[in-house]
Amino acid sequence: YGPEHTILDGSNAQESVIYVGNGQVGVVIDNLHIKNGYGTIPTFHGSIRFGGGILVDEDVRGVIKNCLITKNGIAPSDEYSGGLFVSYRSEVYLINNTITENYGPVWWRSGNTNCMSGWGTREFGRDGVCMNNIMFNNAGDGLYIQYALPLNSIQIRNNNSYGNSPNWYNGSGGGSQTGINDNISQDPLFVNAADGNYRLSPSSPSLSA
């Protein structure tokens, strides 16, 4: 019945609301309201919580669409435990979601590149899409693409990122995607966000955009 009626509430437990485990293929997360998750300690790290709302582990292929992702992560802002975290070598299509009031950005390890790190040489990311999403009022960047040098393996199109602190976007290419590939940064004008109504008002710049 859509995110207004189908709610997955993490109840502020010390785990992610949805944890997609290693190697899952054909994952579809659709039409859900995902809220109040704090993040899980994943297989790739032994002490830090990742992905309060949704944690996508390694080598996953899936779609996250038409969801409302709110109020996830640990305050004060924890960059890894916000609304969504996508880990190594995963191919994700993030389409038509509203991601708002989370403690941390959408954090995406991507970029078709190898990186020397504490885990050795790792391949970060496959092709993916971030399209038609609203990222609003998150305590952290709207979207953070990690290790994206160059930024050539993920399409960032037709998104509205506004009111996130400090940036629209962080990663390869600078702190904003406004005006690039039809991305904008304007108040989405929800009907009544304070009362939990994240429908778009008739004057919203994100309607039909």
Image: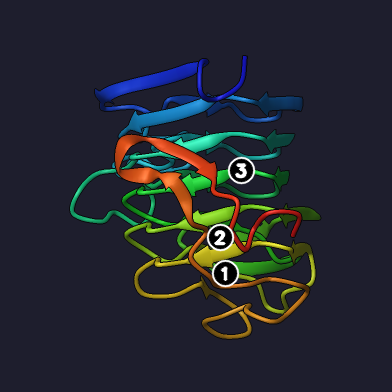
Residue assigned mark 1: 116
Q: Position of residue 111 (x, y in %)?
A: 70, 66
Residue occupying the far front of the picture: 202
Screen quadrant of the N terminus: top right
Image x and y of residue 166, in percent:
36, 74
* Front position in the image: 197 or 166: 197
Query: For residue 192, which quarter of the picture?
Result: top left
Q: Residue furthest bottom?
A: 174
Q: Label 2's element?
A: strand
| Labelled pair 2, 1 in contact (Cβ < 8 Å) | yes
Q: Measured along the vertical axis of the image, is residue 141 above or below residue 16?
A: below
The residue sitting at 63% across, 84% down in the picture is: 173
Marks 2/3: CA distance? 34 Å
Image quadrant in which the C terminus is located: bottom right
Give, as a three-letter code, the residue at label 1. Met
Q: Disc 2 residue type?
A: Gly
